[in-house]
Image: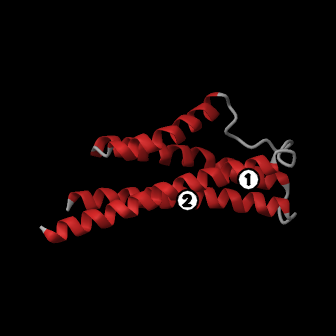
C-alpha cells in the first residue's frame, strides 16, 4: 500500500511541473500574439522558473529516497540541464531578447513538457501496476 502512495505523490509533483511549464508556454503564446507586453511576459515566466527547478529537484530526491532508481535515473538529465542553466545564469528570460529567442524558448519548454509527460505516463503505469499488485495480495 505504501508504494501506491509513493506513486501518487510523484504523480502530483509531475502534474505541478506540467502546470508550470504549460503556464510558461501560455505566456510565450500570449506574447507571440501581442496579448501581453514583453516585460509582463518575462516577469511572469521568471517568477515560476525557480519553483519549477525546486519541484523537479525535490521529485528526483523523492525517487532516490523511496528507492525508485529507474525513475530517479530518468529525472537526472532534466535535473542536470536545469542545474547547467542556473549555474550559467541562463535560466531567466531576458526582456530585451525575448522576441529574438521566442521560438527557441517555446521549443525548449515543449521539449521539457514532452519529457515530463513521458515521466507522467510511466508514473501512472507504475501506480496502476502497484494497485493491481496490492489488490491481488
Residue at which label 2 appears? 18
- Of 8 and 134, nearer the camera is 134
Q: Decide if residue 81 is on the left or right side of residue 34.
A: left
- Of 93 and 119, nearer the camera is 119
**Dots 2 and 1: beta carbons under 8 Å?**
no
Q: Decide if residue 8 is on the left or right side of residue 117.
A: left
Q: Residue at x 83, y 62 (%)?
A: 36
Residue 57's spot in the image, x, y percent? Answer: 47, 42
Which quarter of the figure has residue 33?
Answer: bottom right
Q: Which mark is residue 106?
A: 1
- Residue 66 to residue 86: above or below: below
Return the disc, 2 or 1, that comes first in the chain's sequence.
2
Q: Residue furthest left?
A: 137
Residue 61's spot in the image, x, y percent? Answer: 38, 41
Q: Residue at x 29, y 64 (%)?
A: 129
Residue 62 visible in the picture: no
Query: How many marks do you count on the picture?
Result: 2
| Quadrant (top left, top right, bottom left, bottom right) of the N terminus | bottom left
- Of 137 and 106, nearer the camera is 137
Which quarter of the figure has residue 72?
Answer: top left
Amino acid at each position: 500500500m505504501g508504494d501506491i502512495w509513493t506513486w501518487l505523490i510523484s504523480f502530483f509533483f509531475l502534474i505541478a511541473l506540467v502546470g508550470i511549464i504549460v503556464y510558461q508556454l501560455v505566456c510565450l503564446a500570449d506574447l507571440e500574439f501581442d496579448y501581453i507586453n514583453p516585460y509582463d511576459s518575462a516577469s511572469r515566466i521568471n517568477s515560476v522558473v525557480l519553483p519549477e527547478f525546486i519541484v523537479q529537484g525535490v521529485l528526483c530526491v523523492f525517487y532516490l529516497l523511496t528507492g525508485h532508481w529507474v525513475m530517479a535515473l530518468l529525472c537526472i538529465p532534466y535535473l542536470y540541464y536545469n542545474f547547467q542553466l542556473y549555474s550559467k545564469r541562463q535560466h531567466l528570460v531576458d526582456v530585451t531578447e525575448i522576441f529574438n529567442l521566442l521560438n527557441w524558448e517555446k521549443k525548449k519548454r515543449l521539449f521539457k513538457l514532452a519529457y515530463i509527460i513521458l515521466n507522467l505516463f510511466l508514473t501512472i503505469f507504475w501506480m496502476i501496476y502497484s494497485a493491481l499488485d496490492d489488490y491481488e495480495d
